[in-house]
Image: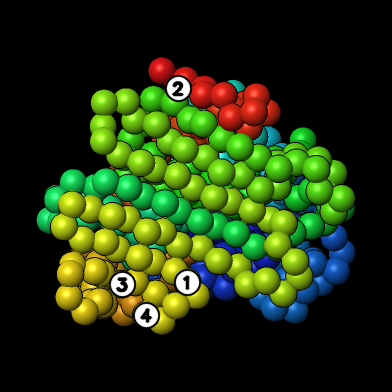
């Protein structure tokens, strides 16, 4: 498979480094609007570069296109690539609106191509462990789940991260991971209730710090998530969760070692991490594997075998965007409940 990459920023560079680790997959081209990024890609990778994602797609040099451009370009570039006959992997969020996502899904169906979305937590071993704990019921019923994803301000090329119309702000760039995790673990909530901070002199508007409650009617369950991009410089990026069951508690933090701890009443335990992809990724040391690499493994495997994507479907990624939009509406109504029925 020949891969073309649109966007050579932080996520684009990360995906570029990993693509070369797969048998039978070759990165052949990179597109970026910035000349210095194109020069960097040529130096790093020795590949042909293009001045825009559109130019790369129209050249039809790739069987697979990775869209790692700013968020407002995810839908148009993905649709263009699908219509050109390529399979597409787009970074999250899938789009800025559910309508954009629906157009992407329609293009993928029309062309008979795979459309993957980088909701990477579904491939992260510590989150896979939580999924298995909930689904198996081994610790009893889940009673509460609190998630966090906080850090400093992201800026990006031409300040696109700070422009709500182009990037959606942190609630789309950062917090959306935990919204997606909630849907994966527990299904669509009945409603959301959110509170947000928008007035930050470093940004151009949009929610920069948010707290959300996910409401599941008729279930004795408390679920919440905090997301932020307003911490001072040098504040370490922090992600994690605390899940309390009837008979245990699980705590994950990227800032502790070991990152995952299990509490069942005695001394804390360090659980063995699951292998999210099972036999597909046999032989891999899962404890040191990147969730980003695992999502690529799964994507390429589905293309090779002609199998539909199941871990992250385009429809599930669209639903995540829909819920985040509901969270924004709630936050701008002083925490009013917004129904998702």
| Quadrant location of the C terminus in the rendered image | top left
User: Quarter-wise, where is residue 316 in the image?
Assistant: top left
SS under mark 2: loop
- Of residues 305 and 186, the one nearer the viewer is 186
Colour scheme shown: rainbow
1 and 4 marks in contact (CB < 8 Å): no
Q: Secondary structure at mark 4?
A: loop
For label 4, the crowd category at 10 Å Cα-Cα, with few meaning under 14, some 14 to 19 and many 20 or more, is few
- Element marked by disc 1: loop
Label 3 sits on residue: 261
Residue beneath label 4, please? 258
Q: How many marks?
A: 4
Circle 1 residue: 254
Q: Are marks 4 and 3 in contact (CB under 8 Å)?
A: yes
- On the image, the x and y values in percent for residue 132 come to 22, 55
Q: Mark 3 or mark 2, which is nearer to you?
A: 3
Q: Against 150, is 169 above or below?
A: above
Q: Residue at x 71, y 43 (%)?
A: 197
Residue displayed at 24% across by 73% down: 271
> Is the residue marked by circle 2 packed among few (<14), some (14-19), or many (20+) residues within 10 Å?
few
The first of marks 1 and 3 along the sequence is 1
Q: Measuring 23% from the left and 53% from the top, which residue is drawn there?
A: 245
Q: Position of residue 61 (x, y in %)?
A: 63, 54
N-term-proximal mark, 4 vs 2 = 4
In the rendered structure, which disc, 3 or 2, sits on the residue that comes first in sequence? 3
Q: Is residue 84 visible?
A: no
Q: Relative to 35, is 120 above or below?
A: above
* Structural crowding at the residue carrying mark 1, measured as other residues with C-alpha within 10 Å and reported as few (<14), some (14–19) or many (≥20): some
Q: What's the distance in space between the residues labelled 4 and 3, CA to CA?
A: 7 Å
């Amino acid at each position: 498979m020949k891969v073309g990459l649109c966007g050579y920023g932080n996520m684009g560079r990360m995906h570029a480094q990993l693509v070369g680790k797969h048998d039978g997959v070759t990165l052949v081209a990179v597109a970026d609007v910035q000349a210095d990024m194109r020069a960097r890609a040529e130096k790093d990778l020795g590949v042909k570069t293009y001045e825009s994602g559109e130019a790369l797609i129209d050249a039809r040099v790739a069987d697979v296109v990775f869209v790692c451009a700013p968020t407002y370009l995810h839908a148009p570039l993905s649709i263009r690539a699908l219509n050109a006959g390529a399979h597409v992997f787009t970074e999250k969020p899938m789009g800025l609106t559910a309508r954009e996502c629906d157009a992407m899904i329609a293009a993928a169906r029309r062309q008979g191509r795979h459309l993957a979305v980088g909701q990477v937590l579904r491939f992260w071993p510590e989150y896979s462990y939580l999924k298995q704990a909930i689904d198996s019921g081994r610790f009893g019923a889940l009673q509460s789940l609190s998630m966090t994803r906080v850090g400093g301000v992201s800026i990006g090329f031409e300040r696109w991260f700070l422009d709500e119309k182009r990037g959606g702000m942190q609630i789309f760039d950062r917090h959306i991971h935990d919204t997606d995790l909630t849907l994966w673990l527990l299904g669509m909530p009945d409603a959301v209730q959110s509170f947000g901070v928008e007035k930050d002199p470093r940004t151009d508007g949009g929610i920069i710090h948010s707290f959300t409650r996910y409401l599941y009617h008729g279930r004795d369950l408390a679920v919440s998530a905090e997301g932020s991009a307003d911490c001072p410089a040098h504040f370490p990026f922090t992600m994690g969760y605390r899940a309390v069951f009837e008979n245990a508690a699980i705590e994950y933090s990227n800032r502790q070692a070991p990152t995952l701890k299990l509490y069942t009443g005695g001394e804390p335990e360090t659980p063995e991490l699951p292998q999210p992809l099972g036999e597909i990724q046999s032989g891999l040391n899962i404890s040191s594997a990147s969730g980003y690499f695992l999502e690529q493994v799964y994507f390429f495997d589905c293309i090779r075998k002609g199998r539909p994507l199941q871990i992250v479907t385009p429809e599930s990624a669209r639903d995540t965007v829909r819920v985040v939009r509901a969270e924004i509406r709630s936050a701008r109504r002083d925490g009013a409940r917004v129904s998702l029925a």
